[in-house]
Image (cartoon, rainbow, N blue to C red):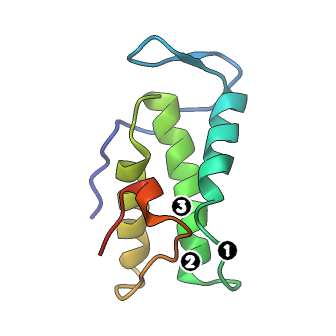
Amino acid sequence: MVTFACGWPGYASDKPIRGGIGRLMTADDVRDLVNDELKHIPLGTSGSPQNELRMIYNALRAARLAGDPDCPRAKTFAEAVAMVRETSPEFRPDLLDPGHFDWSE
């Protein structure tokens, strides 16, 4: 079972989201940020755990940012890896820059 680190999933909309430090994020801001972060997680082969990671991270990160714009990407990434490992226990994520997600194994 995965415990979520940054609140419950929210719904994306054009309504601005206020973060704990007062910054505003629109749905477009969230999408752009998540897309930039996904550039650090390479594509895998079709149906691979690597692609499952990208899919889960994409959805989970957008939901976390909608609920808490200050949610650290490292926590969301760790949650996504844990979810992939529920079905692929030996999975090791392929990352272009593990430091981007504060990841080490």
What residue is rendered at 47% in x and 55% in y?
Answer: 100
Quadrant in which residue 102 is drawn: bottom left
Q: Residue 79, position in %: x, y?
A: 37, 58
Earlier-in-chain disc, 1 versus 2: 1
> Disc number at residue 87?
none
Q: Position of residue 104 (x, y in %)?
A: 32, 69
Residue at label 1? 43
Q: Residues within 10 Å of mark 3 (few under 14, many from 20)?
A: some
* Amino acid on which the number 2 mark rests in the picture: Gln
Residue 52 placement, left or right of 15: left
User: Number of labelled discs?
Assistant: 3
> Counting residues from the N terminus, which is met first, the one under dot 3 or under dot 1?
1
Label 3, label 1: how far apart the Cα atoms are: 13 Å
The residue positioned 65% from the left and 83% from the top of the image is 47
* Residue located farthest toward the top when viewing the structure as drawn: 22
Front tag of 3 and 2: 2
Task: Choose top left, top right, bottom left or bottom right for residue 32.
Answer: top right
Q: Secondary structure at mark 3?
A: helix
Label 3 sits on residue:
56
Depth order, front residue of 99/13: 99
Neighbourhood count class around disc 2 (C-alpha, 10 Å): few under 14, some 14–19, many 20 upward:
many
Which mark is nearer the camera, 3 or 1?
Answer: 1
Q: Position of residue 95 (x, y in %)?
A: 52, 71
Identify residue type, mark 1: Leu
Mark 1: secondary structure: loop
Residue at x 56% of width, y 69% of height: 96
Residue to which mark 2 is pinned: 50
Residue at far bottom of view: 90
